[in-house]
Amino acid sequence: MLRAAIIGCGSIYKLHANALLHTEQSELACVIDNRPERAQRAAELYSCQWYSDWTSILEDDSIHVVHICTPHHLHHTMGLEFLKHGKHVLCEKPIASEVRDAEAMIAAAESCQRHLGVVFQNRYNPNARRAKELLAQNHLGDVLGVKAIVPWHRDRAYYNSERWRGHWESEGGGVLINQAIHTIDMIQWLAGDITSVQGQVATCALADTIEVEDMASGYLQFAGGQTGVFFATNDYTTNAPVEVELHCLEGTITLRGEDLIVNGEPMATPSDRSQSIIHKSYWGLGHEDLIQRFYQAVAENRRDYVSGRDGLRALQVVKAFYHSSLSRQPVRLPDAILHNCGR
């Protein structure tokens, strides 16, 4: 039995806690939040211990896995310390705010022989899994191009509700690093690594509230020769379904929200018991499967889960957007300049 701690009791932690209830190898030992009242409420809800200081469990050898559900700028520091103290780490996206910090976490995991996972749960959505199968079977031939659109809504109240949101220092970016990074991971998982980004970012509707971007667009090139177009915004009037379209030699595969459409025809996908978990529809349905896969891999010392290196690849693309927007030039990946790329 792997005993777990969840750090951060904000909007996402319940998905982790609920998933642990359905994971045979796990037990939720404690929750931690620097707001004691939040930690206490979470502990009462899940019948576990609580702490207000995350360092309280560093030396606790009875804690085997730590879930990091904190603001972005804390991921790196916490992740490094927990790995160095012999704990496995499952980190909410992004893996870190800076490429060099993500690389340090990966190096620590390898050096300490511990597992480092990143939460890109949309890989486990039924429609995404089926699309992956169709591509593996070469059902429609090679992928020629990719289109991805993230039309979401975040208002002033959202950013004002947490002080870390909307600032470069604490969030590391805006719509790209916080919302659209899931879609960046998805298109790389389906079509292969992105090798070049020519992008632009802007702060439009929320310019009086945030200093990070609320809109981004770009032209992408992939390792296999495919090209792609990408658009993401937090300025739409609602959280509309994310759309990923793969233009193949003999047709198209489209993921729109939870639907899968092949050559214009809806395709049925297997039901997923994660649907029983209360979630926001735009989060997808894959948290439970992702967490269970991670625990199975830890228990059996396997590497078949969404890894720190997957998190690094998505973060590199995000940073390439920012640098390309500043330089007004394409950015090749991986590029050493990304190690020090800020806005």
Image: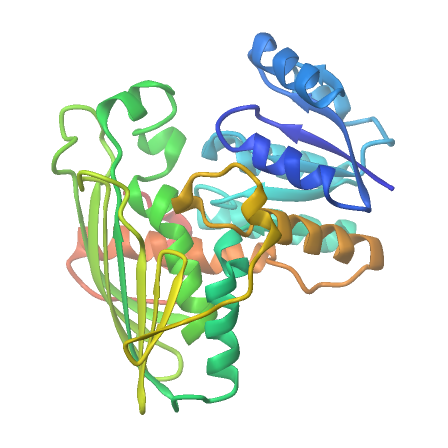
| Residue 4 locus on image (x, y percent) | 75, 34
- Tell me where residue 87 appears, x and y as whole percent: 76, 40
Location of the C terminus by quadrant is top left
Q: Is residue 16 visible?
A: yes
The number of callouts visible is 0
Q: Residue at x 41, y 75 (%)?
A: 191
Q: Please determine whether, in this image, residue 64 is positioned above or below residue 167.
A: below
Residue 193, position as x, y percentages in the image: 43, 71
Q: Is residue 253 above or below residue 312?
A: below
Q: How far across and down, in percent of the image, does residue 81 sit?
A: 68, 34
Q: Which residue is at the front of the view, 322 or 125?
A: 125
Q: Which image quarter: residue 156? A: top left
Which image quadrant: the N terminus?
A: top right
Nearest the viewer among 5 and 74 is 5
Q: Is residue 130 left or right of residue 324?
A: right
| Residue 104 seen in this snapshot | no
Residue that appears at 63% across and 53% down: 289
Tell me the colour scheme of the image: rainbow
Q: Residue at x 37, y 38 (%)?
A: 172
Left or right, residue 327 beside residue 68: left
> Is residue 205 shown above or below 256?
above
Quadrant location of residue 147? bottom left
In front: 59, or 176?
Answer: 176
Picture residue at 44% right of the left edge, 72% below the top: 190
Q: Nearest the camera: 111 or 61?
A: 61
